[in-house]
Each structure stands twice: as C-alpha cells, then as structure tokens.
Image (cartoon, rainbow, N blue to C red):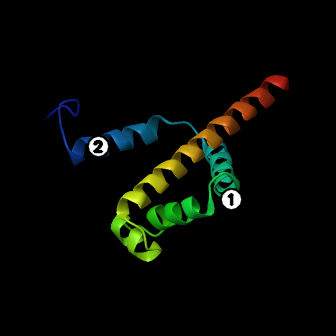
Amino acid sequence: MQSTRYRRGRAYAADMAVYTLQMAGDNSREISRLKRNLIRCLQEDVTPRQRQALLMYYAQGLNMREIGERLGVDKSTVSRTIKRGEQRLQRCLRYGAAAYLRSLDEK
C-alpha cells in the first residue's frame, strides 16, 4: 500500500480531511461564535456594496464577471470590492477574537 505522505491530488486531500476531522476536538461552540461574529461583521463593518458583492460571490456562487454584469461594473472592480470586504471581515473577526480572549482572562 502506498503511503499517503507521498500521494498527491484529490486522494491525498481527502485523506488529510478525514484525518483532520478524526483528530479535531469538539469545536462547535467556537464555530457557533465565529458564525455569529461573521454575521455581525457583515452587517456592521463592510459597506453595502462590499456586502452585496461578497454575498453574490460566496452565497450565490457567481463569478466576478457575472457579478460585474449584474452590478454594471467591470470585473476588476468587483475583485477589488470583494478583496476589500474580505480584509474588513478579517480585521473585524481578529478584533472580536482578541476581545473574547481578554474577556476570558478577566474571568
């Protein structure tokens, strides 16, 4: 049998996904908190245009060209809008995680 260490492609990725799931502990509480924070960040920290582009891209599965056609802008503008929205979300979630850790230290 071939070692998974040296296999490449989808089979290796599937093996790693199964291994990761088996080794992971129960993190449902953290995932739930992350989802709540993500929704809050989408509502409060990104611009309406960024939110619209992010939702079309991630939730509806549209590509940059299709989003650009619907919004009446170039696909490079859509790409920049999504990238800036992602950066805002990352900053928001990073700050939220830091605040959460500080609250644990205070307990």
The residue located at (33%, 39%) in the rendering is: 16
Q: In the rendered image, which quarter is residue 90 located in? A: top right
Label 1 or label 2, whichever lies nearer to me, is 1
| Residue 72 spot, x, y in % from top left | 43, 74
**Label 1 packing within 10 angstroms: few (<14), some (14-19), many (20+):** few
Query: Mark 2 is on which residue type?
Result: Ala
Q: Quadrant of residue 52?
A: bottom right
- Give the left or right position of residue 2, taking residue 49 as reference: left
Picture quarter with the C terminus: top right
Mark closest to the chain's N terminus, 1 or 2:
2
Residue sitting at x 61%, y 39%: 91
Q: Amino acid at mark 1?
A: Gln
On-image quarter of the N terminus: top left
Q: Which residue is mark 1?
A: 43
Real-space Cα distance between discs 1 and 2?
Answer: 34 Å
Secondary-structure class at tag 1? helix
Question: Residue 13 shows which numbered tag?
Answer: 2
Q: Residues within 10 Å of mark 2 (few under 14, many from 20)?
A: few
